[in-house]
Amino acid sequence: MLNKVLLIGRLTADPVIRYLPSGTAVTEFGIVWNRRYKSGDEWKEESHFFDVKAYGSLAEDLSTRLSKGYMVVLEGRLSHDRWTGQDGKNYSRVRIVAESVKIIRKPKIDEIEEEEIAPQDSSSEIERIEEELKEFSREEKTFDDEDEIPF
């Protein structure tokens, strides 16, 4: 079975770090991915929001290096949490557990919260991000004994 997520997006808020009773660091943050598409003659945009969680040394590193507005490449896996609330109802949510995160772009101080990319510029932006992603995948070639063999 394969459970792998690869996402490029912006942080929606500063990461929040907590520690488990065992001392393991846990960082949580949100990420948004915007999809821009053309419907007839009109350009539309839809936003998709994801909850992300990281553990251990990655969590500690992310909590100090990231903040709202950073654009990142996130690689991880989906996790489905289920619980029963105090009201007796069953709840669930799917979130991403981060395994690696790479900063693509830091936010500018004077940057507007949502960056506009003109339709004619979107292909060059996508090509630039794809090239950075290729470089990222070439750099990340170390595997632990517990990792599966990559194909």
Image (cartoon, helix red, strand yellow):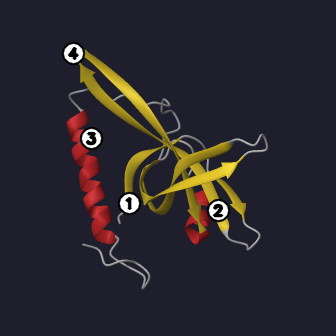
The residues tagged by marks 1 and 2 sit, at their Cα atoms, a distance apart of: 20 Å
The residues tagged by marks 1 and 4 sit, at their Cα atoms, a distance apart of: 34 Å
Mark toward the viewer: 1 or 3: 1
Q: Does any portion of residue 45 appear in the rendered image?
A: yes
Mark toward the viewer: 3 or 4: 4
Question: Which residue does the image show at 55% across and 40% down from the upper left?
Answer: 12
**Which image quarter: residue 74?**
bottom left
> Badges 4 and 2: C-beta atoms under 8 Å apart?
no
Judging by the rendered image, the residue that carries numbered circle 3 is: 125
Question: Which residue does the image show at 57% across and 56% down from the upper left?
Answer: 53
**Which image quarter: residue 62?**
bottom right
- Which circle's residue, 1 or 2, is located before the other in the chain? 1
Question: Which residue does the image show at 56% across and 43% down from the upper left?
Answer: 68
Residue 141 percent across, percent down from the top left:
32, 75
- Which circle's residue, 3 or 2, is located before the other in the chain? 2
Q: Total label count?
A: 4
Judging by the rendered image, the residue that carries numbered circle 4 is: 40
Judging by the rendered image, the residue that carries numbered circle 1 is: 4
Judging by the rendered image, the residue that carries numbered circle 2 is: 26
The residues tagged by marks 3 and 2 sit, at their Cα atoms, a distance apart of: 33 Å
* Amino acid type, residue under disc 2 in the picture: Val
- Which circle's residue, 1 or 3, is located before the other in the chain? 1
Residue 81 percent across, percent down from the top left:
59, 54
Mark toward the viewer: 1 or 2: 1
Mark toward the viewer: 1 or 4: 1
* Amino acid type, residue under disc 3 in the picture: Glu
Mark toward the viewer: 3 or 2: 2
* Amino acid type, residue under disc 1 in the picture: Lys
Residue 138 percent across, percent down from the top left:
27, 69
Label 3 secondary element: helix
Quadrant where the N terminus sits is bottom left
